[in-house]
Amino acid sequence: MRDNDRVTSATRQPETAPETLPPRLIATDLDGTLLRDDKSVSPRTVAALAAAEEAGIEVFFVTGRPARWMDVVSDHVHGHGLAICGNGAAVVDLHGGPGAHRFVKVRELARENALDAVRLLRDAAPGTVYAVEQTYGFYQEPAYPKLHMETPDSLAPAEELLGPDHRAAAEPVLKILAYHPEIDPDAFLTLARLAIGDRANVTRSSPSALLEISGPGVSKASTLALCCAERGISHEQVVAFGDMPNDVEMLTWAGRSYAMGNAHPDVIAAASGRTVANNEDGVAVVIEQLLTELP
């Protein structure tokens, strides 16, 4: 068990065990973490990311965003240029630039599981509406609100969108989105996890009652662990950053982890340290400190 009674500030030398290994990989969430509220990457953060890569530390962007929303960081790709998108549902090579991202790994949500999740959550929370996120397409129910920065490819009930006759039936489903207009966001998350059980992984990253439902066992943490294993990197050599419940597993798994100053209480409890808010370049503050600790 991690001792979270002592919270480390990124503005001072952290208390670390003598056996702490030098970092080999930085895993950072985007919205509310690396990005400022205006969705920009500050010059200080750009410089810190470049300095980390120059020092031999890989940087992974680990986000709930789909691949087509990664343009905000495409200009800041260094080294391998890989990102984990869709809360772990896809590993994407960003080197192709906007509109030309290549899927390296896909961990899809089986349509049978997705349909089960839709049915169970409809029963548990009447009034829930859905959208379906696939590798290249975005589809939603007519009553689903305009929460995203794009026009859906088609409108239909979720059961039809996930059915065998839908025009995108051959395209992998990365996650489904479930929105409720009235329920408290944290209460909705708890309710959905109880209702859906092990048929899917349920989390959230929005301040509204918007849930993100992925395949069983699919999370930022599990996909990051796979990527690290392929590189011979242990969890003790990973430094992670996040601000919302979809970051909790990743922050718990990483050897060192930092909750942003603007983080959800569950994130603060999960992380081994804290830094300042995203608008104050909290990720850059920690990276700059880490680089001074390198041998």
Image (spheres, grey):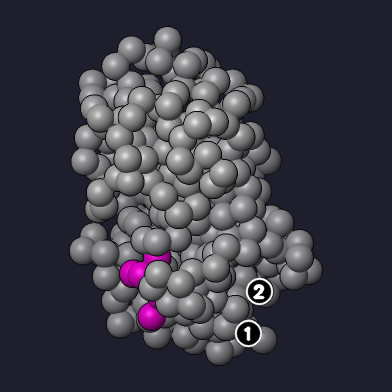
Left or right of residue 283: residue 105: right
Left or right of residue 79: residue 286: left
| Span highlighted in magenta in the image | 70-75
Is 269 above or below relative to 65?
A: above
Q: Which of 79 and 57 is in front in this view?
A: 79
Is 135 above or below relative to 109?
A: below
Q: Which mark is residue 56?
A: 1
**Pointer 2 local density, CA inside 10 Å: few below 14, some 14–19, many at least 20:** many
- Residue 39 x/y as whole percent: 26, 64
Give the SS element for disc 2: loop
Q: Name the residue under label 2.
A: 24
Q: In which quarter of the image is residue 80?
A: bottom right
Which residue type carries mark 2? Arg
- Residue 68 x/y as whole percent: 40, 61
Is 79 above or below relative to 200?
A: below
Q: Nearer the viewer, residue 218 or 259?
A: 218
Quadrant of the snapshot with the C terminus: bottom right
Residue at point 32%, 25% (across, down): 129
Label 1 close to label 2 by CB (< 8 Å): yes
Is 186 above or below relative to 233?
A: above
Residue at point 50%, 56% (across, down): 85
Q: Which residue lies furthest to the bottom in this view?
A: 54
